[in-house]
């Protein structure tokens, strides 16, 4: 379920949207893996190699699309923020980690959408 907030103001008898906010809305442009039996391709070495960038105005930070090419689509994905600063959180979950406690269980990544339209990594966490 998502959340949308719109703020209106009256100008010359006409109401116009002056600000907007959305949270946890699905995006048709960003696909999510709905197959719980998929292969979990993450390694700690690959996680360590990912580059963390700034939240905005930088070409640093590993792009989301490059990560998807390497390890596939995430199991969970949420987008929050407004048009000026969108944040995407994704989670990859290892369906077989219960069989081997030494395997990675989960990878959580956060991205910010940059001016060039690309999602770039700003934070990474694994357990």
Image (tube, rainbow, N blue to C red):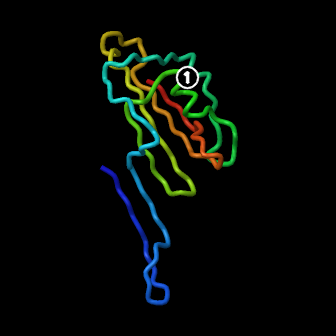
Q: In this orientation, which residue lies closer to the viewer: 37 or 105? A: 37
Circle 1 Cα neighbour tier, 10 Å, few/some/many (<14 / 14–19 / ≥20): some
Assign a secondary structure to mark 1: helix
Residue drawn at x 38%, y 25% is: 93
Q: Is residue 8 left or right of residue 111?
A: left
What residue occupies the far bottom of the structure in this picture? 12
Q: Position of residue 77 (x, y in %)?
A: 41, 38
In this rendering, the answer to whether 105 lies above or below 77 is above
Per the image, the residue denoted by label 1 is 47
Q: Is residue 25 left or right of residue 110?
A: left
The image quarter in which residue 51 lies: top right
Residue drawn at x 69%, y 43% is: 58
Q: Position of residue 103 (x, y in %)?
A: 41, 13
Residue drawn at x 57%, y 40% is: 119
Q: Position of residue 18 (x, y in %)?
A: 49, 73
The image quarter in which residue 60 lies: top right
Total marks drawn?
A: 1
Residue drawn at x 45%, y 46% is: 79
What residue occupies the far front of the structure in this picture? 28
Which image quarter holds the C terminus? top left
Q: In this orientation, which residue lies closer to the viewer: 37 or 127? A: 37
Q: Is residue 99 left or right of residue 53?
A: left
Q: Position of residue 106 (x, y in %)?
A: 41, 25
């Amino acid at each position: 379920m998502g959340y949308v907030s719109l703020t209106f103001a009256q100008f010359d008898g006409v109401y116009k949207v002056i600000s907007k906010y959305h949270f946890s809305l699905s995006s048709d442009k960003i696909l999510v893996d709905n197959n719980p039996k998929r292969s979990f391709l993450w390694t700690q070495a690959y996680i360590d190699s990912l580059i963390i960038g700034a939240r905005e105005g930088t070409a640093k930070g590993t792009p989301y699309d490059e990560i998807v090419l390497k390890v596939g689509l995430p199991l969970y994905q949420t987008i929050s923020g407004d048009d000026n600063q969108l944040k995407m959180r994704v989670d990859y979950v290892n369906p077989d980690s219960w069989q081997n406690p030494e395997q990675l269980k989960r990878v959580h990544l956060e991205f910010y959408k940059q001016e060039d339209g690309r999602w770039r990594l700003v934070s990474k966490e694994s357990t």
